[in-house]
Image (spheres, rainbow, N blue to C red):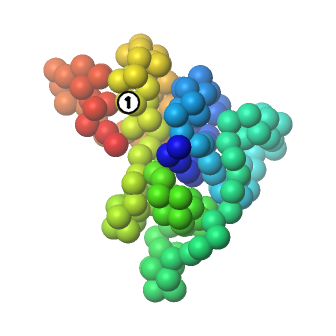
Amino acid sequence: MDSLVFDTSAILNFGHRGELAALLKKLGGEYRILTTPEAQNELTDPKRKDFYSAFLKEHYIVQSATTSFDFATLANLTRTIDQAEITVMTLASELDGRAVLDERAARREAKVLGLGVTGTLGLMNEGLKKLWLTEVDCINAVAKLCATGFAIPRPTPGHSFTDYLSTIE
């Protein structure tokens, strides 16, 4: 079974920000859904501590990576991304899975390293293609995400939301 390794922002987007737990459950039928202890430790909002404790327990395997990138690669990565993103990329590399990253810098670094990468919108697109979500579900989730500061590229005028999502990884 293929693996999806989620960074903190993607966990938040599937949790309270975008309320995409139903999609996460569907993805869990086809993928191993993981995160790292470092990403888990970034979920520090005391108001949502109980929510995320239960959310992680229900949907995620929390696993440490046992290997690491070489020193030069690590030194370069620490200049642009945080420790949680590095461990997510390391675990995704180790498992030959996809890193689920929404931050532009982390996605860029993952691609440079030749890792499979996707994000919240890419997984929503997968859900749309597999008919786990409707276009209305996606639009509502994106509206919730944008209300919390999630930034997405502007769609091309005249194209459907489905067409737009198909251009996103």
Residue type marked 1: Asn
Name the quadrant containing residue 134: top left
Vertical placement of residue 166 versus 33, above or below: above
Residue tagged 1: 125
Local crowd at mark 1 within 10 Å, few (<14), some, or many (≥20)? many
Asked which secondary structure carries label 1, the reply is helix
Vertical placement of residue 131 versus 105, above or below: above
Left or right: where does residue 97 sit relative to residue 38?
Answer: left
How many marks on residues?
1
Name the quadrant containing residue 112: bottom left
Left or right: where does residue 142 sit relative to residue 159?
Answer: right
The residue lying furthest to the front in this view is 1
Name the residue rendered at 75%, 45% in the picture.
Answer: 45
Evaluate whether residue 12 shows in this view. yes
Vertical placement of residue 40 versus 48, above or below: below
The residue lying furthest to the bottom in this view is 72
Looking at the image, which is closer to me, 130 or 73? Answer: 130
Q: Quadrant of the C terminus?
A: top left
Name the quadrant containing residue 48: top right
Name the residue rendered at 57%, 61% in the picture.
Answer: 91
x and y percentages locating residue 51 in the rendered image: 77, 34
x and y percentages locating residue 102 in the rendered image: 46, 48
x and y percentages locating residue 67 in the rendered image: 59, 73
Name the residue rendered at 29%, 22% in the picture.
Answer: 162
Name the residue rendered at 19%, 30% in the picture.
Answer: 156
x and y percentages locating residue 84 in the rendered image: 61, 62
Looking at the image, which is closer to me, 107 or 30? Answer: 30
Evaluate whether residue 89 shows in this view. no
